[in-house]
Amino acid sequence: MPTPGPPAPRTSASARAAVLSGLGTSLPPRVVTNDELAQRLDTSHDWIIERTGIARRRVAAPGTTTAALATAAGRAALASAGRSSCETVIVATTTPDRSCPATAPSVATALGLTGAAAFDVSAVCSGFVYALSVASSMIVAGLCGSVLVIGAELYSAIVDPDDRSTAIIFGDGAGAVLLERGERSAPGAVLHHDLGSDGEGRDLITVPPGERFLRMRGREVYVRAVPTMTASARRVAEAAGWRPGEIDGFVGHQANLRILQSVAKRLELPDERVIANIAEVGNTAAASIPLALASAAGQGRLARGDRLVLTAFGGGLTWGSTALLWSGARPVHQEVEPLS
Ligand code: UT7
């Protein structure tokens, strides 16, 4: 007879929560500066930094896949949590390696997790927040005990290198968190979600049917992003019982530093509570929130128990927010590895 393990925690469904236990990232090594872009595009470092806050971004080498980036970030998140396995893998991406099948099963197998539930979430820049809500709901419903949520993007595959309005903005990379079953009062607890969409705006950020490259009507996206992100962040904070001013860290999708600052101003948050790493990695769509979280955690800017609001806005149009208590997870970074 096998020795029985420890009894399962007696957590009631109402007190049960998904708790963030690990945080991992992966970035391709090649750095592309604004000056490098200005050598071949009609733009300048000054224009890019003033209008977007971006100084440099990472671009993957030819042959790198979204699955390879996702696998490296997923492996790093598991290592951060001190785990070697999990029950479900969700990949949020705008740039899957194939339109069919999804990327997540390849990632799960590359992580040695064949047999795990694995699927993709497609919500463009809001993909990570959407995937977090699915993962956390699966845990709260008792469907599984652990979910790896990965945001991974290879925008270099869909950005037109000759389009100065998008080539200066987007970068490649991946970030991941491990969620595990725990209690709502625990540091790391994911507390509330707010999700929305407006398909009338589908042409504002799109790869038009039959075309290869992404097209974005940036100014129109910008003017919608600020009020929509502000309202979503307010709703999720209110659901968590926090006044906007009580948010310790606002982790917005890193699309444009001016958008983050405008939203923070409307929420009456001082600049030091705005988490931003856009200068270093640009806009990495579904990967941007976990990359920003890892950057802040790595710099010691987040304290265990901090009230965090994650808010995204992007193609679809889609938007969403998550309220969570910071866990104190130490981020792990892993170089991207080729898939065998
Ligand atoms: O991640 C998904 C969500 N995406 C977003 O949230 C993106 C939101 N949008 C933005 O971040 C900004 O709209 C951009 C950074 C994309 C553009 O900044 P902007 O301040 O809105 O500029 P604009 O598009 O209104 O263009 C202003 C001028 C135009 O010239 P004219 O017509 O005034 O002569 C553009 O042609 O700047 C010109 N321009 C550039 N100039 C130098 C556009 N791109 C560039 C460039 N370098 N790269």
Image (spheres, rainbow, N blue to C red):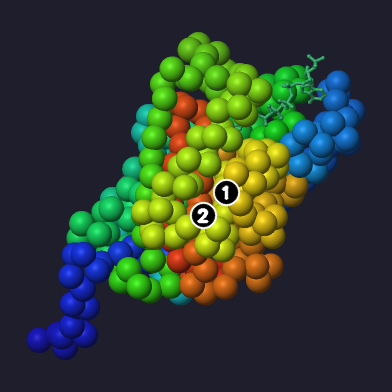
Of residues 51 and 212, the one drawn nearer to the viewer in this rendering: 51
Q: Does the residue labelled 1 lie within 8 Å of ligand 1?
A: no
Task: Judge from the rendering whether residue 51 lies leftward or rightward of residue 15; answer left or right.
Answer: right
Mark 2 Cα within 10 Å, few/some/many (few <14, many 20+)?
many
Amino acid identity at mark 2: Pro
Q: In which quarter of the image is residue 167?
A: top right
Q: From the image, tell me which residue sits under label 2.
A: 244
Q: Which residue is depicted at the point 45% across and 42% down?
A: 232
- How far from the left and from the top, in percent, is residue 2? 14, 85
Q: In which quarter of the image is the N terminus?
A: bottom left
* Residue 220 visible in the snapshot: yes
Q: Where is residue 130 in the image (x, y as percent from the top left)?
A: 40, 43
Specify the label residue 267 is tagged with.
1
Looking at the image, tell me whether mark 1 or mark 2 is earlier in sequence order: 2
In which quarter of the view is residue 21 placed?
bottom left
Residue 229 falls left or right of residue 182 = right
Position of 313 with respect to 162 (left or right) is: left
Observer-nearest of 78 and 101? 78
The amino acid sitting under disc 1 is Leu
Q: Is mark 2 on a helix, strand or loop?
A: helix
Which is more toward the observer, 37 or 72? 37
